[in-house]
């Protein structure tokens, strides 16, 4: 069975600085997808970034980028120039196949200090 | 284009009552997923439906829980004879096949 592990229950960062959230996963599949979702206090799940396993290039979305290490089964999220609005729960997630059935980690609560 | 709509946002039920949670997918989306989020936990997959079909219900508890996605109307997650352990946030997501799934804002169920 696939599992997703986030080893940092909480992280904090100063505004304008950079923070990296860790995620590891376990799978026997070779073709799969990895995601980072943000859940602010409103509870809305917001897709931050997505990575296809067959792509060697790390995905980037503005201030958000990932470090995808397929052999190590590691998928960390880097947030640059942190903003107060980045404060939220961040979930790493995995899926494979032709549907969007997601396996989530337990999340990392990110606090941004002014 | 309205997003995924879930209602109600908050639902309080007494033990033994039935809970019905509704999810209207985004326009044109024929795939619906239900997830449950217990306190301090990530989301856990429950069921995956397409119009009039249950595709994968491997995450659904064997008893008291059922889901449907009729040809017309919203998807419904039904919990019969609720117990305190059913208290959680329930999320619905919808997608067109093989594309990004969009989440609703969830229904927080409290069983008293």
Image (cartoon, coloured by chain):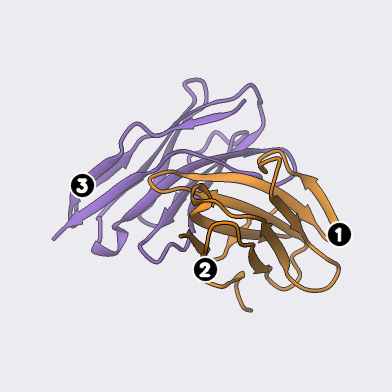
Residue B94, image x, y percentages: 67, 60
The residue where tag 1 is placed is B52
Residue A92, image x, y percentages: 46, 42
The residue where tag 2 is placed is B11
Q: How busy is the neighbourhood of tag 3: few (under 14 within 10 Å), some, or many (20 plus)? A: few
Subunit of mark 1? B
Q: Is residue A81 above or below residue A30?
A: below
Residue B98 visible: no
- Residue at image position (62%, 39%) is A95
Q: Is residue A77 above or below residue A56?
A: below
Position of A90 with respect to A3 (left or right) is left
- Residue at image position (47%, 21%) is A72
The residue where tag 3 is placed is A12
- Pair 2/3: label in front: 2
Which chain corresponds to the colour purple?
A
- Pair 1/3: label in front: 1
Position of A81 with respect to A98 (left or right) is left
Q: Could you say which quadrant of the image residue A103 lies in? A: top right
Position of B52 with respect to B20 (left or right) is right
Q: Split into 4 quadrants, where in the image is the C terminus of chain A?
A: bottom left
Q: How busy is the neighbourhood of tag 1: few (under 14 within 10 Å), some, or many (20 plus)? A: few
Subunit of mark 2? B
Q: For marks 1 and 3, give the CA distance.
A: 45 Å
Q: How busy is the neighbourhood of tag 2: few (under 14 within 10 Å), some, or many (20 plus)? A: some
Subunit of mark 3? A
Q: For marks 2 and 3, give the CA distance.
A: 33 Å
Q: Is residue A21 above or below residue B64?
A: above
Label 2, secondary structure: give it.
Answer: strand
According to the rendering, which colour does chain B have? Answer: orange
């Amino acid at each position: 069975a696939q599992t997703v592990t986030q080893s940092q229950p909480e992280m904090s960062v100063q505004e304008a600085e950079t923070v990296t959230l860790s995620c590891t996963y376990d799978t026997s599949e070779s073709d799969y997808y990895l995601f980072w979702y943000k859940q602010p206090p409103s509870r809305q799940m917001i897709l931050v970034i997505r990575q296809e396993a067959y792509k060697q290039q790390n995905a980037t979305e503005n201030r958000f980028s990932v470090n995808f290490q397929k052999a190590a089964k590691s998928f960390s999220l880097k947030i640059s120039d942190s903003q107060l609005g980045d404060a939220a729960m961040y979930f790493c997630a995995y899926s494979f196949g032709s549907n969007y059935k997601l396996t989530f980690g337990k999340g990392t609560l990110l606090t941004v200090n002014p | 284009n309205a997003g995924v709509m879930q209602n109600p946002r908050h639902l309080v039920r007494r033990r033994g009552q039935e809970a019905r949670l509704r999810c209207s997918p985004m326009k044109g989306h024929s795939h619906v997923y239900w997830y449950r989020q217990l306190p301090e936990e990530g989301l856990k997959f429950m069921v995956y439906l397409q119009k009039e079909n249950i595709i994968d219900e491997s995450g659904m508890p064997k008893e008291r829980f059922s889901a449907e996605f009729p040809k017309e109307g919203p998807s419904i997650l039904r919990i019969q004879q609720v117990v305190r352990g059913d208290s959680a946030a329930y999320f619905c997501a919808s997608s067109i096949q093989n594309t990004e799934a969009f989440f609703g804002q969830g229904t927080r169920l409290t069983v008293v």
